[in-house]
Image (cartoon, coloured by chain):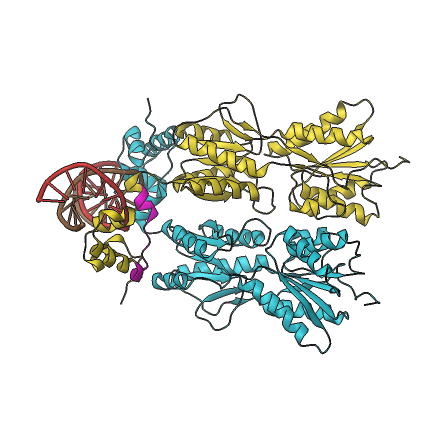
Chain colours: A yellow, B cyan, C brown, D red
DNA sequence: CTGAAAGCGCTTACAG
DNA sequence: CTGAAAGCGCTTACAG
């Protein structure tokens, strides 16, 4: 009769007829122990299906070798490859990654931060710079090393590894304007608690405002879902004088817009141009392929991991890393239709 | 000068001039404590940025309230909404979800299982039924409750919450054949350590084999990446007598195939039909929209969570849950071209 | 090479 | 309502 409780070091020690100290040594530094004992212990471990209790070990050693990443969502590929790269660098350093999501809710972000810290995260990857004051205070008083990614700010007392959403959107919009578009529609992301979405929207608006003759016909905020993009586009198309180009907060929104345009028998880009942001896999699969802004996800993930590892090791680098985005022109962008 | 170490219960107690027992009570059952002490303690917690040590608490209470999910990848939306639903049900029950990925590698799966168990997971969600004997043995000897999802098997001594990949692929292929296709190409997923991919491939092959006159022109395995799908399709199109319909292991592969077909100036579905599997967001965004098999991700996630929670609570339900898939016919499927 | 024992941060009967 | 103390599963000087 075996009990239902998880086997402990003590169980292993009993079965192998050694002390817990010996079992522990075998787990952590096998060479310190004689061959005979080692064999018995390894056998005992296998027959019991023993796995060390991480919490107990962390308690005894005062080290966890884990960091956390807290991201808005797993639902689109917006963060997947960045997190993947982040994780790979950590793994090389023997550090485990814990992932949690917020659903873009700052309150949940704080809860998740607490949860990961409580589980031993000695450093955190956070997305964007919009968060509760309470969260900032918490991070500050605990001095929890954290790097903020997917955005960038200069000279702050924070570590940023990201890119300039505003500048990227500004640049993309200028290129759209350079094609001759005069009436621009903006399908922004949901800007509540989302500085990246806001910066993209504002960058696009500023680029239009900087021209003599072009104008923003309408700005519609929409959550990052295909269907929301489709609806927003339909709303645009109902206007008496609809835009000839749509700047979208991300590729998912742009993909939705493309569906709506197609439903309205509009040819892309002959009748309407559509531009996304992120360059996730979807962007090159749609027809025509989507013009978008490539976000340096992998470089961000790698750089963030490096910085965070340093910070956890006590050598914080407050300079941060600013990466470049790249405008990717594909078939969904063209000049405006001749007869406006 | 504050130390760099994390604040502990003791620190809070000292600052508030109470015992650790009182602080602990305030954390877990505030009503048991007087108002005055409570105020002081809450203030101390805030000024120290105290967060309980999960491991220490788990050690003392012998309960973790956490389960783990170990999935192949976060990189496409294949699992995202299922896991999301899974998490939501857990959250309602006050249970935390830990997520880890395997990259489709059974060795990594075992490592991740160990890692999550060591971190307190008292139950696990696993994907598919292909795993190391060592993993099965480990799970069995520890009696770790686990539900296996994204596939289904009857009458096993395991808990399955999933669907029949073979039957779904068989059915989808029959519908393709019913359009009159005689030459079928199969772009399968990578079947190494992937029973779902294998079942889908085999189901498709069996459906063709059950006919008098249709045949499988070629079967090409490819990892679940757009580019791999594109390449596989190109290989198909180089055949002297290429298939008129492509059955793909998932939507990502099918999306890649659509790109290749388009590059070859083939009209979909007039020149070639393409069918995917999963019905992720991508499927309805491509042009033409993709015919595919809808996987009941959300129901799976919810049902799996329910079963797992029961099992962890000591009432395992070995009957399992078999869910239905749904064939979604969209524009990418049509009859074969007249002149074969 | 091996073991006895203290201590990591928490919770919880047990007293008062 | 509150505290002293034992104990959860580990690791690691310290002895031998």
Point out the image quarter for the C terminus of chain A: top right
Q: Which residues are magenta?
A: A46-58
Q: Is residue A205 above or below residue B145?
A: above
Magenta highlight on residue A276: no
Q: Quadrant of residue A141?
A: top left
- What residue do we see at 84% from left, 48% from top? A265
Left or right: residue B318 compared with residue B338: left
Report the predominant secondary structure element of the magenta stretch: helix
- Residue B325: x and y in percent read 62, 64
Q: Residue at x 66, y 32 (%)?
A: A200
The number of numbered badges drawn on the structure is 0
In this view, the residue farthest toward the right is A339
Mark yes or no: residue B159 visible.
Answer: yes
Residue A253 location (% of width, % of height)? 69, 42
Q: Residue at x 78, y 33 (%)?
A: A184
Q: Is residue B18 above or below residue A60?
A: above
The answer to whether residue B65 is visible is no
Quadrant (top left, top right, bottom left, bottom right) of the N terminus of chain A: bottom left
Considering depth in this image, is A63 or A128 the residue closer to the camera? Answer: A63
């Amino acid at each position: 009769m075996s009990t239902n409780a998880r086997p402990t070091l003590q169980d292993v020690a009993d079965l192998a007829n050694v002390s817990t100290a010996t079992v522990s040594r075998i787990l952590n530094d096998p060479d310190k122990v004689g061959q005979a004992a080692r064999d018995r212990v390894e056998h005992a471990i296998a027959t019991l299906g023993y796995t060390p209790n991480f919490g107990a070990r962390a308690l005894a050693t005062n080290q966890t070798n884990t960091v956390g990443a807290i991201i808005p969502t797993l639902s689109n590929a917006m963060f997947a490859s960045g997190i993947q790269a982040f994780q790979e660098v950590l793994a090389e350093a023997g550090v485990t990654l814990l992932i949690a999501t917020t659903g873009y809710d700052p309150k949940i972000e704080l809860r998740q931060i607490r949860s990961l810290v409580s589980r031993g995260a000695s450093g955190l990857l956070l997305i964007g710079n919009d968060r509760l004051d309470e969260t900032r205070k918490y991070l500050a008083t605990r001095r929890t090393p954290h790097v903020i990614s997917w955005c960038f700010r200069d000279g702050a007392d924070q570590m940023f590894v990201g890119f300039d959403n505003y500048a990227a959107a500004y640049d993309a919009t200028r290129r759209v304007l350079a094609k001759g578009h005069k009436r621009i529609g903006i399908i922004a992301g949901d800007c509540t608690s989302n500085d990246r979405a806001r910066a993209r929207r504002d960058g696009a608006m500023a680029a239009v405002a900087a021209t003599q003759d072009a104008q923003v016909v309408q700005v519609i905020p929409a959550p990052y879902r295909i269907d929301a993009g489709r609806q927003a586009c339909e709303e645009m198309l109902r206007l008496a004088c609809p835009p000839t180009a749509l700047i979208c907060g991300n590729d998912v929104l742009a993909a939705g817009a493309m569906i709506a345009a197609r439903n309205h028998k509009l040819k892309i880009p002959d009748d309407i141009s559509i531009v996304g942001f992120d360059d996730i896999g979807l962007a090159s699969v749609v027809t025509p392929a989507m013009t978008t802004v490539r976000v340096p996800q992998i470089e961000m993930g790698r750089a963030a991991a490096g910085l965070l590892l340093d910070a956890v090791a006590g050598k914080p680098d407050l300079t941060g890393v600013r990466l470049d985005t790249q405008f990717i022109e594909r078939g969904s962008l063209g000049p405006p239709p001749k007869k406006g």
